[in-house]
């Protein structure tokens, strides 16, 4: 084999090793995060573990029930890890689905039920600080909101401005409102 041919082969092997190596690192972290830290909504989250629902009280006078629901899901393995350690494991995903609701008189009473989806909040646990300088990552999590009309692209620009101020009351629980999720308590 002449030396220039050997060089091409070696360079090719090194390059493909780098490319495969890079993909493997990103993939082993999370299937919902690309190598630049872009988050996508897990398409199968509705078959995950349903952690709980927050009912948004109707705010008009004389109106009963909920005008919306925030339904929260995570992977089943996140629930078992949390029960053992009291911590969210690396790669844990929390999806909060925003739903509109209606309230009707039914045979069970005055009942609110979910109708259409307005969007999804997604958080992904990153205990290694992988995406330094990325404005959607920090405080141990990736943060993104998606509106129903464009589920592929987040509307979140900066988690420090768009998410953190409202999550400060949950800071001591790793920024998560665990009180609404009895399943985590065992
Ligand atoms: C207006 C205040 C507010 C803002 C802004 C906000 N959150 Fe939240 N978030 C909450 C509250 C309060 C809860 C729990 C109760 C609820 O859903 O009403 C919650 C719950 C969540 C949950 C379910 C897990 C948990 O913490 O209990 C996720 C996921 C979430 N938020 C992600 C985000 C992301 C990502 C952003 C920024 C893009 C964000 N939130 C911005 C107030 C907020």
Image (cartoon, grey):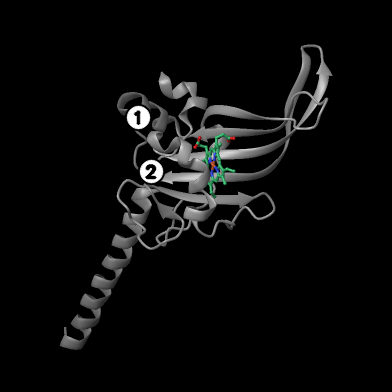
Indicate the quadrant containing the N terminus: top left, top right, bottom left or bottom right. bottom left
Give the side of residue 137 with respect to residue 128, left or right: right
Indicate the quadrant containing the C terminus: top left, top right, bottom left or bottom right. top left
Q: Position of residue 86 (x, y in %)?
A: 34, 28
Q: Position of residue 18 (x, y in %)?
A: 28, 67
What is the secondary structure assignment of the residue under circle 1? helix
Inter-mark Cα distance, 2 to 1:
11 Å
Give the side of residue 62 with respect to residue 78, left or right: right
The disc placed on residue 33 is none
Residue drawn at x 24%, y 77% is: 11
Name which of mark 2 and mark 1 comes first in the sequence: 1
Crowd around label 1: few <14 · some 14–19 · many ≥20 (10 Å): some
Residue bearing the label numbered 2: 91
Q: In the rendered view, tell whether residue 2 sits above or below residue 74.
A: below
Residue drawn at x 39%, y 38% is: 174
Residue bearing the label numbered 1: 81
Q: Position of residue 133 (x, y in %)?
A: 38, 63
Q: Quadrant of residue 62?
A: top right
Relative to the observer, which residue lies in front, 28 or 123? 123
């Amino acid at each position: 084999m002449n030396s220039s041919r050997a060089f091409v082969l070696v360079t090719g092997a090194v390059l493909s090793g780098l490319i495969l190596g890079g993909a493997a690192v990103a993939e082993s972290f999370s299937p919902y995060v690309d190598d630049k830290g872009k988050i996508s909504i897990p398409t199968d989250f509705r078959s995950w573990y349903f952690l709980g629902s927050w009912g948004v009280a109707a705010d008009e006078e004389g109106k009963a029930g909920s005008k919306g629901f925030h339904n929260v899901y995570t992977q089943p393995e996140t629930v078992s890890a949390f029960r053992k350690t009291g911590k969210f494991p690396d790669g844990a995903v929390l999806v909060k689905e925003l739903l509109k609701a209606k309230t009707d008189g039914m045979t069970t009473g005055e009942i609110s039920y979910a109708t259409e989806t307005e969007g999804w909040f997604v958080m992904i646990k990153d205990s290694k600080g992988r995406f330094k300088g990325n404005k959607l990552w920090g405080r141990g999590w990736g943060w993104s909101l998606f509106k129903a009309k464009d589920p592929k692209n987040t509307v979140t620009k900066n988690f420090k401005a768009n998410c953190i101020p409202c999550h400060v009351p949950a800071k001591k629980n790793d920024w998560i409102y665990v009180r609404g999720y009895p399943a985590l308590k065992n």
